[in-house]
Image (tube, helix red, strand yellow):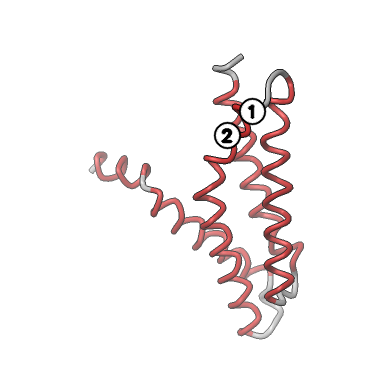
């Protein structure tokens, strides 16, 4: 059983699916006061964006961490990841007509930026 759990934990597909379900569900909750079609579209958009961000965030942080040195190595990658993620999230939610954009993106941005900062720290301390 633990072999199966370990394989699932390493699976990109599992991570992407979890991000889709978790953050898509959050978007449904954040937009629950609006008609079902708008709420569902917000959930689908957020789920898809979270899945894509989950897939690429690790690689982006690794590349950015290799580019910077000194104190910037700890600060720049998560800040750049935050700004890039926020730009994508706001743009796509505006284009899709999400009613509660700030509420919708708050949790996904907090989670992705926390991940980027912690992962960046973990790989940067070995390079110092």
Residue 17, located in which quarter of the rendered image? bottom left
Q: Residue furthest top?
A: 128
Quarter of the figure with the C terminus: top right
- Residue plotted at (37% across, 43% down): 9
Which residue position is annotated with label 2? 63
Q: Residue furthest front?
A: 67
- Residue plotted at (63% across, 69% down): 29
Q: Nearer the viewer, residue 47 or 64?
A: 64
Q: Nearer the viewer, residue 59 or 10?
A: 59
Image location (x, y in percent) of residue 49: 58, 61
In this view, 103 is above or below 108: below
Dot 1: few (<14), some (14–19), or many (≥20) neighbours within 10 Å? few
Q: Which mark is residue 31?
A: none
In this view, 78 is above or below 55: above
- Residue plotted at (40% across, 49% down): 12
* Circle 1 SS class: helix
Q: How many marks?
A: 2
In this view, 115 is above or below 43: above
Which residue position is annotated with label 1? 67
Q: Viewed as shown, does residue 55 lie left or right of 3?
A: right
Dot 2: few (<14), some (14–19), or many (≥20) neighbours within 10 Å? few
- Report if the CB atoms under discs 1 and 2 are less than 8 Å apart: yes
Q: CA distance from mark 1 to mark 2?
A: 6 Å
* Circle 2 SS class: helix
Q: Viewed as shown, does residue 110 lie left or right of 48?
A: right
Quarter of the figure with the N terminus: top left
Residue 36, located in which quarter of the rendered image? bottom right
Image location (x, y in percent) of residue 111: 62, 47
């Amino acid at each position: 059983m633990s072999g199966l759990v370990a394989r699932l934990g390493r699976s990109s597909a599992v991570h992407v699916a979890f991000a889709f379900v978790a953050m898509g569900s959050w978007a449904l909750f954040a937009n629950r006061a609006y008609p079902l079609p708008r709420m569902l579209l917000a959930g689908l958009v957020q789920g898809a964006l979270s899945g894509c961000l989950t897939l690429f965030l690790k690689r982006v942080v690794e590349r950015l961490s290799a580019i910077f040195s000194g104190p910037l190595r700890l600060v720049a990658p998560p800040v750049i990841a935050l700004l890039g993620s926020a730009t994508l999230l706001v743009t796509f939610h505006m284009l899709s007509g999400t009613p509660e954009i700030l509420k919708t993106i708050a949790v996904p941005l907090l989670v992705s930026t926390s991940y980027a900062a912690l992962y960046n720290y973990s790989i940067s301390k070995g390079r110092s």
